[in-house]
Amino acid sequence: MNIPPVDVADDEDLQWFMSIHTEAALCVIADEYNAGEHELHVRVEPLSPIEDALCRRDEVDMCELQESQMIDNMDERLGEVRASKIKTLEIFTIREYIPEHTCFLDVRRNAQILAMSAVIGHHIMRRLDDANQSYVPTGIIGDMEREFGVRITYNKAWRAKEKGLRFLRGTPEESFQKLPSYCHMLTEKNPRTIAHIELNSNNRFLYFFLVFGPSVRGFREYMRPVICVDGSHLKGQYKGTLLVATAQDANLQIYPLAWSVVDGETNASWYWFFAKLKDIVDDSNQLVFVSDRKKSIKRAITRLFPLSHHSTCIWHIEKNLIARYSSSNVIFLFKRAALAYRVSKFDQFMTHIRTIRPLMVSYLECAGISTWSRAHFVGNRYNVMTNNIAESLNSVLRQQRSFSITLLIKNITSLMQRWFYERKSASTKCSTTVTPKIDDELRKSIDVDTTLPVRNLDELVFEVGIATELCTVDLIEYWRAAYNKVFHPVGRESNWVVPQSIRSIEVLPPNIRRAPGQELKGRR
């Protein structure tokens, strides 16, 4: 980067070039130049932290300079310059210069003694702002050498990244303390939004529950009563588990309903989660839950939603079968049996399995045929045979699950805002009678030349089919209506208006015991 030209006493311009280039320029204005004493008084603007560290705070040593025009008939190329700052003034005095600068870049490696990881972390923190972009230590090493001519070790680059993230996101302890204020603003801006923080007697964090008002409305009015629940590990300093409850919209997309941060997938945490979920979801014999085979989930559903039906994710059973029997033919037969609509078809596939692997049939019977077989299931789980929609949601938040708690909730809120906006826009532009994914499914399953009679039932519902096989089709209005409400942002933290009673709530991080050994992380 070119430094602004110097204004010298005799109106000649001096162009300064520095070996260190940053976004903040160093503006140099000459007040007086003494050719005999080789002394130049200049005014400078404050350096950025990275310049300040790399150039030394009180003495600028061995900076490469060039002159674009002659000064007092000197045509030599300026090389090494030694200067010192005059105390109490924003002025540097150049004490000595060597006309020819012959040092190579490697000679200046000692200057990196002040390029500490904290300084580098402060410089790179804006590049770490996007959690979905990878910025690995090797990239930091390359950027530092290219921008500043400083070579740093891999360990220093890694520590610089950790400190940069800390500068950008704050400490986990600060995040826990900020959570009540953020939740207050979130509920104030978005009516019917529920955010509940559970603390123990020592004000330490136990559980957190969040459900957005627009999600509650959309589920109650425009979704089929099938809820998938799942949990995934958090990877931050204080660990924990993120529990999610999701539904499926008219376009077969993930529709997040409720979120919770707990200590782990225990009996107590799942019971607490479902107890909070019961405040927004009514128990009925039409309600269906889909999950893996964790006993803690089944126990909580049985006690809190006695009228509902609990089904098992066939994907988890399939994984267990692969681990136990490792037979692709038998696995294929299991999937056909699980997806069969009629008991006769189910019995047919089970007979084939019994012939090939009798022990596998015993395992499937112990797993509860009525929980994984569509033909034997008491309720109506429609096309939701797995809890993959909940698993997919955890995958979407793969990087965010390493964030501190308030930042995690902020990212969840941003995700919901983006999804509601994008899907509302897509549904408004959609010109088909049914939603795009349903339209694709129909085209795959129905012969191109086939035509079916259609009869209006009301403005939004049609009856499609022949007399023996009729089905009703919800128009695309249900898809649009589910995303009709807007998620309002909480705004900048400096503009928050939070009562003192909320600000004064003390939220301490949970007590955890870190496992021995080095923590394993994916390369990002």
Image: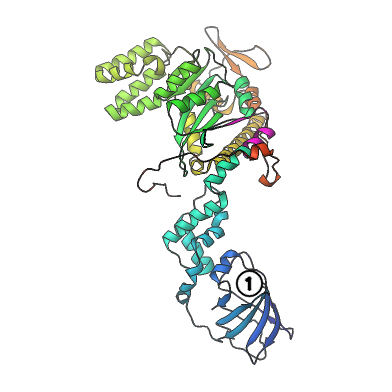
Where is 29 relative to 443, above or below?
below
Between residues 506 and 464, which one lies in front from this camera angle? 506
Residue 313 visible at all: no
Give the side of residue 178 with respect to residue 521, left or right: right
Q: Residues within 10 Å of mark 1 (few under 14, many from 20)?
A: few
Query: Regarding mark 1 in the picture, which secondary structure is present there?
Result: loop
Read off the magenta span.
182-196
Between residues 456 and 148, which one lies in front from this camera angle? 148
Scheme of image coloration: rainbow
Residue that sits furthest to the front in the current view = 201
Between residues 310 and 433, which one lies in front from this camera angle? 310
Residue 127 position, x and y percent, is 55, 54
Residue 101 position, x and y percent, is 52, 83
Where is 339 relative to 35, above or below?
above
- The number of callouts visible is 1
Residue 185 placement: quadrant: top right
Residue 295 visible at all: yes
Name the residue located 74 percent from the left edge and 86 percent from the top edge: 10
* Residue named by callout 1: 2
Give the side of residue 129 with respect to residue 295, left or right: right
Residue 17 placement: quadrant: bottom right
Name the residue located 66 percent from the left edge and 34 percent from the top edge: 487
Assign the N terminus to one quadrant of the image.
bottom right
In magenta stretch: residue 193: yes
Where is 371 relative to 198, above or below?
above
In magenta stretch: residue 135: no
Q: Amino acid under label 1?
A: Asn
Residue 356 placement: quadrant: top left
Residue 149 position, x and y percent, is 50, 70
